[in-house]
């Protein structure tokens, strides 16, 4: 027996059509030589970021880690070291303000020379602020955190988190490719959230665009737990090697291959 009633509505899906097929031969592409000269912090961290030693321009590194393990401190230490080597750096802070950063600078005075964009100053115009500052051109940009920047964009533009994520990924890709005033192939180091089980939170597109993924973890529990960094993915270097670090010495993060 045929069912009565209005026919079921079928949602139509708009599919993109292929306009042009473009095959690439790598021997026909010319690259800026600076893309293949690693930026060095002159610490042993360089050895796990790449086999050549250092952070490469135009790359994207996602960093996740246990709460309180020292993600911001370690990355600010790297940023300050790159700045001391003459690199142009930037810290985009979506989670901390000047009062929060004061404690860091008091313990690590060299952090005080890092240029910082505090997103709290740009409520309602976060997108414009980030796009404008990145257009100035930087060698390395640290973002803390991915979630805060995306949430601010989504709220400001009344859009989904997926759209906000696409905006940030496209912006990073633009500056990876040196589309800024100084023609700098910007490297991004981005702090990202993780699940309770310690897994990465994010879309497949983030994973595909990520050159490397670093984890900062505690080795053990309690007051005597050691801290270490390890890569689970790295297109420029090895994975699985631990570098231990200590945050107790004033003005410098101490690194070692053995427990400190």
Image: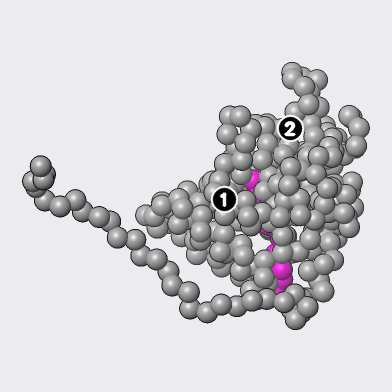
Does residue 152 appear in this view?
no
Q: Which residue occupies the foreground of this view, 192 or 123?
A: 192
Residue 65 against residue 128 in the figure, above or below? above
Mark 2 is surrounded, within 10 Å at the Cα level, by few (under 14), some (14 to 19) or many (20 or more) other residues, namely many
- Is disc 1 placed on a helix, strand or loop? helix
Q: Earlier in the sequence, mark 2 or mark 1?
A: 1
Where's residue 230, x and y in %?
Answer: 78, 39
Determine whether, in the image, residue 147 is placed left or right of residue 141: left
Residue occupied by mark 1: 204
The stretch of residues the image draws in magenta is 183-191
Q: Is residue 185 magenta?
A: yes
Q: Is residue 172 magenta?
A: no
Q: From this viewpoint, which residue is outermost toward the front? A: 1
Where's residue 57, x and y in %?
Answer: 76, 64
Q: Which residue occupies the foreground of this view, 79 or 11?
A: 11
Q: Residue at x 37, y 54 (%)?
A: 158
Locate residue 116: give its quadrant: bottom right
Instruction: Check contact, mark 2 vs mark 1: CB within 8 A.
Output: no
Where's residue 35, x and y in %?
Answer: 78, 69
- Is disc 2 placed on a helix, strand or loop? strand
The C terminus is located in which quarter?
A: top right
Determine whether, in the image, residue 9 is placed left or right of residue 18: left
Q: Residue at x 28, y 56 (%)?
A: 11
Determine whether, in the image, residue 13 is placed left or right of residue 124: left
Q: Which residue occupies the foreground of this view, 34 or 16?
A: 16
Q: Which mark is residue 217?
A: 2
Mark 1 is surrounded, within 10 Å at the Cα level, by few (under 14), some (14 to 19) or many (20 or more) other residues, namely few
Cα distance between the residues tagged 2 and 1: 23 Å
Residue 228 against residue 46 in the figure, above or below? above
Q: Residue at x 61, y 44 (%)?
A: 192
């Amino acid at each position: 027996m045929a069912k009565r009633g209005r026919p079921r509505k079928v949602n139509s899906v708009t599919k993109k059509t292929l306009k042009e097929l473009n095959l690439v031969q790598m021997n026909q592409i010319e690259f800026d030589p600076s893309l293949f000269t690693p930026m060095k912090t002159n610490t042993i961290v360089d050895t796990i970021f790449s086999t050549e030693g250092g952070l490469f321009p135009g790359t994207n590194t996602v960093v996740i880690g246990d709460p309180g393990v020292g993600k911001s401190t370690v990355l600010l230490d790297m940023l300050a070291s790159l700045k001391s080597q003459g690199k142009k750096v930037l810290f985009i802070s979506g989670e901390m303000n000047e009062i929060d950063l004061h404690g860091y600078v008091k313990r690590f005075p060299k952090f005080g020379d890092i240029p910082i964009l505090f997103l709290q100053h740009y409520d309602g115009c976060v997108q414009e602020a980030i796009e404008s500052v990145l257009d100035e051109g930087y060698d390395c940009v640290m973002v803390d955190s991915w979630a805060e920047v995306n949430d601010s964009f989504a709220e400001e533009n009344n859009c989904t988190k997926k759209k906000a994520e696409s905006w940030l990924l496209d912006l990073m890709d633009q500056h990876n490719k040196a589309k800024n005033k100084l023609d700098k192939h910007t490297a991004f180091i981005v702090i990202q959230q993780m699940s309770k089980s310690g897994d990465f939170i994010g879309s497949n597109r983030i994973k595909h665009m990520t050159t490397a993924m670093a984890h900062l973890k505690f080795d053990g529990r309690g007051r005597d737990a050691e801290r270490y960094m390890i890569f689970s993915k790295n297109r420029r270097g090895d994975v699985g090697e631990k570098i231990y670090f200590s945050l107790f010495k004033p003005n410098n993060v101490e690194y070692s291959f053995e427990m400190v």
